[in-house]
Structure formats: structure tokens, C-alpha cells
Image: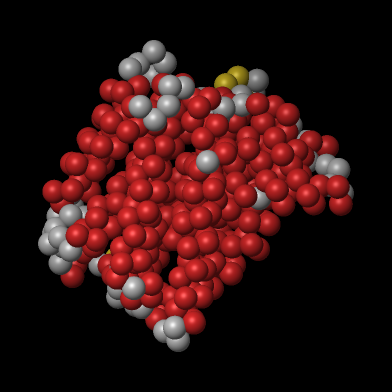
Amino acid sequence: MNETKEQKITLLQALLIYLIAVYSASIRLIPSMTSSVAHQAAWLDPICSLVISLPLLYVLFKVVRKFEGQSLHDIFRKVFGKAAGLIISVLFLIWLIIELGLYLKYAGENLVTTEYIGTDINLLIFLIVLLVGIMLRWGISVLARMNKIIFILTLLQFLIILFFLFLHFRPDFITPISTLDIGPVLLSTVYPLAIFVLITPVFIFNDQIQYDKKSFSKLTLTTAGFLSVVDTLLMLALIGMLSYPIVAQLKLPFFSAVENISVFKSSAGLDSLFMAIWMLAEFVTIAFFTYCISRLIKNIFKLKSQTPLLTAILGFGLFFAIFFSSDMFQLILFSNNISPILNLTFGLMLPFILFLTAKIRKMI
């Protein structure tokens, strides 16, 4: 991997990688998890998540502006001290490795469940790992350029599918909404929020991001707003078409809805297109976590290059994913009960602790 100055990317490119990285998780996890708690009012969860996440964006803005050009590991060391900063970085690393194994397993399960029924899941995960390893050897700038195309394709696909889903929209499936829904909505907001906070690992390679200080707040707010709109439309379309009891029970509600899209009483055949582009998003997700892990290890151990790490990281990720769980049910159980706690601890609480510590030490 050529780690020279041309490996820099813009903040917009970094945020686009983030948007695609969380897209697959959003359409897979948010609908069923929020619907099981908030019922017909689940479409309000992304909006609540946006409101709650605004302080996180403020904190990240303050920290990044103060420590511009420094990696997240370097910021930990300066704010918390060398020893504490190292411990926090190692814990952060363990969290990312768990996330990598989780999303590798999900990618394989999605393919086996939808398009390649009966295929050995381990073979599919190996092929995903192989492709990611080859691509990442060219560096973050290549991933950023590829992701622009993937983002456009994903957005077009999403809008086309939404159009057909809203043709079957039933307003009575998303109503009534009353004060009784406030508690369940706030409780289930933890799921979209747990995915939104994955913006924090982006700043692991903060030293590779070129900033325009005037546009930082605008870009991050636009990104948060865009993600909230996408998730809200997703929830409205699914609940409005299928109803919340069905959405809550389905493993892949969005894919199931796409399969049921019909034009002139015949199948529209959008499921194959959906899976093809969805797997591109999964590819970016896995590449994102792999790059963050390799970059963090490089910074922790002060290595000159992170390229040799890719094979070891993806090899361990493959091994970890194979033994992560035995079926989709266990994956969903982990995503429902454990993953949100880890995500909110490292993606939300840690940035606030970092900000407050830096404030107390008068670094900000």
C-alpha cells in the first residue's frame, strides 16, 4: 500500500464511505428490531436518533478541529496519557474486530439465505475476504473512488425500490400515533443510534482526511440528515406495505418486500438487482472495518506500513466469522442484545469522555 501524501482523501469521500458502510446494516437490522418494540410508530426512530446524535457531531467537530491531522490513537494518547490512551485504543481495536467478524458472517448468511441457497457459507466468506484484501492493497484513496460509483448505484436502486414499495403503501399500517408510543419509540431508538455512531471509527484515519474547516459542520449535518431521511423512508415503506408484525418477524424484511414487488400482476424481478448492489455495500462495509483495524494497529505499534497486516487481519476475521455463530438466529440475538451496547460505548460514550477530559485539561 502506497502510504504517501496522495493517499489523502477528502472529508466528503470519508463520509460517503461511512454512509455505504452503514447502509447494509440499516436495511438489515433497523426495520425488524425497531418494529418489534415501537410497532407502527417505528418509523419515528431514525428521526429521534438524529436528534440524539447531534451532540455527538458537535463533540467530534470540536475534537477533530483541535487535533486536525492526527489519528484517533494519537488523540487518545494526548488527551488520556500514553498508558491510558494505549489501553483505550486496544479496547477500541477489539470492538472493531468483533464488528468485522459480525459483518463478515452477515454477508455470508445473506448470500446463503437469498441467492446461493445450499452453498457452503465458509466459501462465500472466503471469497469476500479475498476480494477485500486485494482491493485494500491499493489504499484508502482507491476505496474512496470506487465508493463514489457504489454510492450512486445504491442511491438509484434505493429510490427505484422505494417507488414500487410506496405503490402498495397503506397509511393505516403506520397509524395511529399517540403519547403511548413515546416510551417504545425512545426505547427502540437505541438501534438506529447504535448504527449511526459508527461514524466515530472514521476518525481512526483522521490523519488521512483533508479538511475544509468551513464545510465540516455542514457536511456532517448533511450526512446525518441524509441517513435519517433514508432510514425513515425505509421504515415507512416497509411498515406501510407489510405492517409492523410481519416486518418484526422477518429476517430480511427489505429483501422480502423487494421479492414481493409486482408490476402488472407479475414479478418485477428487482430482487437480483437489489442483492447485487447490496453486496457491493457489504463489500464497502467489510473494507471499511478492515482498513480501520489495520490503520489502528499501525498507529498503536508505530509500523511503517499497514499492508502486511491486511492478510493477517482478514485471515483472523475469516476464522472469527466462521465460529462467530452457528445460524442467523444467534447473529440476530447478538445484534439485538450485545452489539448496541458495544457500539454505544465506543461510538458514543467514548467521544464524550474524550471531549470532557480534553475540556478539563484545557486542550479544547
x 30%, y 47%: residue: 290
x 60%, y 46%: residue: 191
Q: Please determine whether, in this image, residue 125 is positioned above or below residue 57.
A: above
Instruction: Indicate the quadrant where residue 88 lies.
Output: bottom left
Image x and y of residue 31, in percent: 62, 38
Q: How many labels does the image show?
A: 0
- Let me know if residue 94 appears in the view: yes
Q: Please determine whether, in this image, residue 316 is positioned above or below residue 350.
A: above
Determine the residue located farthest toward the bottom in the rendered image.
Answer: 362
Q: Nearer the viewer, residue 336 or 135?
A: 336
Image x and y of residue 108, in percent: 38, 28
Determine the residue located farthest toward the top in the rendered image.
Answer: 118
x 33%, y 17%: residue: 120
Relative horizontal placement of residue 179, taking residue 105 as reference (left or right): right
- Let me know if residue 14 appears in the view: no
Which quarter of the rendered picture does the C terminus lie within?
Answer: bottom left
Q: Please determine whether, in this image, residue 70 is positioned above or below residue 121.
A: below
Instruction: Indicate the quadrant where residue 8 lies.
Output: bottom left
Relative horizontal placement of residue 43, taking residue 81 as reference (left or right): right
Which quarter of the rendered picture does the N terminus lie within?
Answer: bottom left
x 30%, y 75%: residue: 69
Q: Please determine whether, in this image, residue 6 is positioned above or below residue 361.
A: above
Image x and y of residue 133, in percent: 21, 42
Image x and y of residue 262, in percent: 62, 25
Relative horizontal placement of residue 293, taking residue 21 as reference (left or right): left
Figure colour scheme:
secondary structure
Q: Which of 77 and 214 is in front in this view?
A: 77
